[in-house]
Amino acid sequence: MTRTEPVIGVLGGYGAVGAAAARCLADWGAFLLRIGGRDAEAAARCASSLGGRAEPMAVDVMDDDSLDRFGRGCDVVLNCAGPAYILAERPRRAAAAPGAAYVDVMDGSGPGRAPDGERTAVLSAGVSPGLSGLLPRLLAEGPVPLRAARFTGYYVMLGAFTHTGAVDYLLSLDRDYGVARAQWRDGRVVRGALGGAQEREVAGVGHPVTVYPYLTRELVGQARALGLAEARWYNAFDGHRLLDALNRHRAGDGGAGSLDAGVAGVVRASTLDALGRTPYHLLWGVLEGSGPDGAPVRRTALIRGDDGSAMTGTVGAVAVRELAEGRIPPGTHRAAHVLPARAVTDALRRHQPGTAVVLSEGPADDEAAAGAGAAAVMEDGVL
């Protein structure tokens, strides 16, 4: 490969997430790619599909020497391999050793100090976390800035978990990712402020789903940055089996508290919930505040796609582009705090035709505005 453009190494580059990211990066035409994974033939097939923009390289993400070889010569390493919480800081350290910048669609490294020699890192550049944390900023910025006061967000997913996805999902619950039943209010996290699971209508779904309040660290950061008086986040379940499996895992019923049993239960339950139905990932945010004239305003954002892996890969690709083109300052960042929200939604529209982005605005007392995307979820909208 002749080095005339930035080289982006994509770990897990032929998986569902990595391949989507690689396609975006190749389509932009500004980068050369290195597609990495343990299956050399799969890496070669993926690389050959990218129109001469990529080379394959076999790499074992559990082997430090292999990772070190992969990272040498890269300007940015994008990690799409997993499970993130088992790999922990290994890919990040491997990128730091030769001086490459780093992007991760998850963040299994925990709150510890950055690896020695690290340049710049963007973590949690996926759907949730990542796109979920961009919702308040997307709504606050708008064509006319909004003085934000209250935000409520929802994430609904219907689809079968992979084994890797289930591992990360369960481990994230024990890694200070958020606080159940908590609310952000008046500058602090108020624990136990909200009730438990309940049935609720969520725009874009068409029928009630079970919502559970779970205040994420990501939203707490955005609430601080935007000066929100109140913020709430709900994980929503379209079907009862997955939520039941999570409750059994937390309670440790019948051995379900072990990781292996919990993962098997999550995969099985999510598969049954989705059986015979069309999978989807949906984010809905409602931001209330006041406009320049002081009048109360309610803005909503609805993002719905049929392929969560492809959506995650697209967010990761935008993070790579922003970093490689010098628009992210040195240091370690969460994607929701440094990525341009409009650039992410534009990329989703362009590269994932099955993804709809619907934005609306109305008076704060106009309930119709909150559900504006429900009936027209497959149509793009603008503020």
Image (cartoon, grey):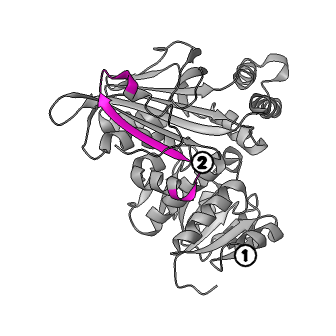
Q: Are marks 2 and 1 in contact (CB under 8 Å)?
A: no
Percent across and percent down for residue 382 are 37, 45
For residue 55, side relative to residue 223 (left or right): right
User: Is residue 58 among the parts visible in the rendering?
Assistant: no
Foreground pick, 344 / 107: 344
Name the element at disc 1: helix
Q: Residue furthest top?
A: 195
Locate the C terminus by quadrant: top left
Q: Residues within 10 Å of mark 1 (few under 14, many from 20)?
A: some
The residue where tag 1 is placed is 48
Q: Quadrant of residue 287?
A: top left
Foreground pick, 269 / 370: 370
Percent across and percent down for residue 241 are 75, 23
Residue drawn at point x = 49 percent, y = 44 percent: 379
Q: How many marks?
A: 2
Q: Is residue 38 above or below residue 32?
A: above
The residue where tag 2 is placed is 106
State the extent of the magenta-drawn residues as a range: 350-368
User: Is residue 124 among the parts visible in the rendering?
Assistant: yes
Residue drawn at point x = 57 percent, y = 21 percent: 212
